Image: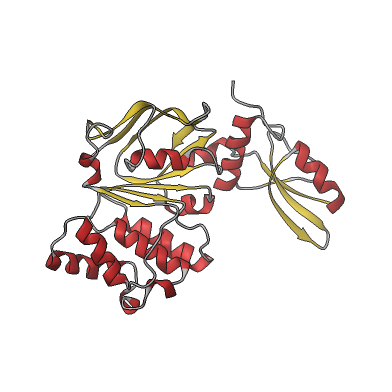
Amino acid sequence: MNLKINNLGKEYRGGTWGIREFNLSLEPGVLGLLGPNGAGKTTLMNILATITRPTEGQVTWNGVDIAKSPNELRKTLGYLPQHFGVYPNLNAVEFLGYLAAIKGFNGRHARKRIDELLHLVNLWDVQKRPLGGYSGGMKQRVGIAQALLNDPQVLIVDEPTVGLDPEERVRFRNLLSDLSGERIIILSTHIVSDVEATATEIALVNQGRLLQHAPPEHYLQAVEGKVWSYVISSAELSEARKTKLITGTIRRSDGVHIRVVAEKSPTQEAKRETPTLEDAYLYHISKANGINGVEAKS
């Protein structure tokens, strides 16, 4: 089971490239595709989901070019797009039954699979309620259920937790973790905590290019010993943002407690902190862009 991306590029009208010179090889596990808004993540997802064709390069599924033979991947693909729509007047059983029919399931097989998925995504008790009355998180769970109808070997989810409340976000993360194993899961997001909770590997994307592909530990090691905290006044915060890579702020009675990534201690009072993936992510993005005093890659 291998999904391979070779020198992939997508050019839009006006000469703008969504992604460029993108190379990645994926095996079973959860890949966190992490990057800022506009980094090219959704462009890549659309190509992998066979919705759009690349301008250059190729994607192969077990050695087969998906642009030339898209059905080879489609028959084993599950996809939850960023903007997932439902028919509000249908209930969960009716909606999933409709999609199962489109995928070619027979009636008995479809109903058995739908029952399994409603239990899996914790919607069994509300299966007859119209989808228009579902919360955002419940609709997302319907979305993951439809993506799992064909028990896919490749599951793609694009910004799945945007707009969800904290409880729903945690539930969704746990569901993705439970689904991993003998399948490739690609989680595309700009929310670092989603990746931190679920991913076995992280592909860091910026300005349409792949910066790094490595386990989370690799990113954390890069900022080991470089994260500091200290207190400044509110009046000093604006100037500090111009010259320092600040990854967190907390306002307290004695001032603003800031968290900074820096090669050396920024002040004598600074205390060294244990790095988080958020620190590492902002460090690598800033390094690529050459901002906040972090030297860009050569």
Q: Position of residue 274 (x, y in %)?
A: 61, 47
Relative to 155, residue 133 above or below? below
Q: Position of residue 80 (x, y in %)?
A: 37, 53
Question: In which quarter of the view is residue 120 placed?
Answer: bottom left
The residue that appears at 37% across and 75% down in the rendered structure is 130
Question: In which quarter of the view is residue 225 placed?
Answer: top right
- Left or right of residue 29, residue 33 in this image: right
The residue that appears at 81% across and 48% down in the rendered structure is 237
Count of numbered circles on the image: 0
Relative to 48, residue 211 above or below? above
Q: Position of residue 136 (x, y in %)?
A: 47, 66
Residue 184 appears in the picture as rendered: yes
Relative to 63, residue 82 above or below? below
Q: Which residue is situated farthest in the front direction here?
A: 13
Q: Quadrant of the C terminus?
A: top right
Q: Position of residue 173 (x, y in %)?
A: 43, 59
- Left or right of residue 153, residue 33 in this image: right
